Amino acid sequence: KILILDFGSQVTQLIARRVREQQVYCEIHPFDVSDDFVREFAPAGVILSGGPNSVYEAVGWHAPQSVFELGVPVLGICYGMQTMAQQLGGTVESSGKREFGYAEIRARGHSELFRGIEDRTNDEGHGLLDVWMSHGDKVTALPPGFKVIASNESCPVAGMADEVRKFYAVQFHPEVTHTIKGKEMIARFVHEICGCGHDWNMPDYANEAIEKVRAQVGQEEVILGLSGGVDSSVVAALLHRAIGEQLTCVFVDNGLLRLNEAEQVMLTFARNLGVKVIHVDATEQFMGHLKGVSDPEAKRKIIGREFVEVFQAEAQKLPNAKWLAQGTIYPDVIESAGSKTGKAHTIKSHHNVGGLPETLNLKLLEPLRELFKDEVRELGITLGLPHEMVYRHPFPGPGLGVRILGEVKQEFADLLRRADAIFIDELRAADWYDKTSQAFAVFLPVKSVGVMGDGRTYEYVVALRAVETQDFMTAHWAELPHSLLGKVSNRIINEVRGINRVVYDISGKPPATIEWE
Ligand code: XMP
């Protein structure tokens, strides 16, 4: 396995993604772990990430010295290269200007890292590479034992290596897709230089995870809040496989779910898989508390609070339960890790089940803690969940509560559910569902005038939203074909009495957000 030490770069997670794509297991830890930790981890290789600092300014921001004493290969990226240079006796200085973005570099000498990897060659037959640079500092003197393996005019040391000790470092970012051959460089490092095999694969992982849950839980019982989303669904499938009847899922219908969602969850889990699921219809309780409330944050708080209340009441009916299972995934773990680098990450405040563990006095079971989102999906498929469930768009915890602007009313939720289902149906039919990251309808509680047959109508508006995004932090509105939008609009207006106008949201994030509230 590979140890990735994080110096706070925004793209550290991508390094882990790239390594795991090579079927090599890796973990990200903060750079300030102890020497003992590094030795106990016993990595086959270490990768030092980029980071926002300057090595000569950020006192103490260096790798544990043991990294260079283990006798295993090390790859430094950007800041990781600078700290490697400095810790091993080289010099790093400010280059006076920041370089950011695309750059062409020339591979030099014969380095194992770049051997046979190039985008093209120059007139003299030297390999050229298209890379993504981001730096304000440069290595001006190599540490003893090192040679230059890549350079260009503005960055004379764009890469350096000590082939004897197998220390490699690059000033650019091989982990981002803009570095065209980055994937091959990572593959070279982990497979050939570190000697890792292709050991990280889903069927094996699934079996190990099942065994691990059995060992952890023993004969005790487990409760899981099943939402129908990808993460909790995969946890349910995994735990059911591992401990069968010892698992009880609680599915809370807050009245703000999509059309037929409750039925579908019950069908997939209770009927088809034979999972014990308690279906709680708490629509009235949620609607009652939301009455008269129109502030978005207040609505979110109420929905979160009522969820905890309902869930807790159900949990108390299961006195034998000793564990609470949650669908926490690896990005959540990294984001909330308490360390100096924690600051570089944006911490998401969207947590649906926050506050549950403490009050329930249950032990936490988080079987997806090591997985990235796409690995969770792969695991779901491996466990036999339907493709449609595993590859569905994310749905926010507060559900339609944040898609009905202002006060939430049962009548509005019913109209919105039907309009939304038509939109999603048509997206699927036109093969656009998988091309968008998230798509949904929003209910606008304003009325506008229309005509239908001989009569005048005065009804509500629905907005359609479809976005494309990698990380949900920024997003583009999807350029859906006009014919598709036209068809959706026609169907909604004709089939959903109460809606006489449909509009399409063409706002990017930023400055808008994906949801309307
Ligand atoms: P925004 O609207 O902030 O949404 O651009 C980004 C992503 O987060 C989802 N989202 C939520 N998820 N609870 C959740 O579980 C929430 O309160 C919440 N608010 C937004 C949103 O659907 C999108 O995928």
Image: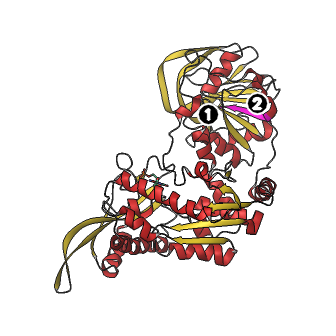
Viewer-nearest residue: 81 or 346: 346
Mark 2: few/some/many CA within 10 Å (<14, 14-19, 20+): few
Residue 499: percent from the left, percent from the top? 29, 74
Which residue lies under the disc numbered 2?
37
- Mark 2 or mark 1: which is in front? 2
Viewer-nearest residue: 263 or 105: 263
Q: Is residue 155 visible?
A: yes
Q: Is residue 143 magenta?
A: no
The residue located at (57%, 24%) in the rendering is 152
Asked where in the image residue 15 lies, by quadrant, the reply is: top right
Viewer-nearest residue: 36 or 506: 36
Q: Where 146 falls versus 462 (above or below)? A: above
Q: Are marks 2 and 1 in contact (CB under 8 Å)?
A: no
Residue 108: percent from the left, percent from the top? 68, 26
**Mark number for residue 474?**
none
- Answer with left or right where residue 37 lies relative to residue 223: right
**Mark 1 residue type:** Leu
Mark 1: few/some/many CA within 10 Å (<14, 14-19, 20+): many
Q: SS for tag 2?
A: helix
Q: Is residue 48 magenta?
A: yes
Q: SS for tag 1?
A: strand
Q: Is residue 394 visible?
A: no
The residue stretch that appears in magenta:
41-49
Which residue lies under the disc numbered 1?
128
Q: Give the quadrant of the C terminus.
A: bottom left
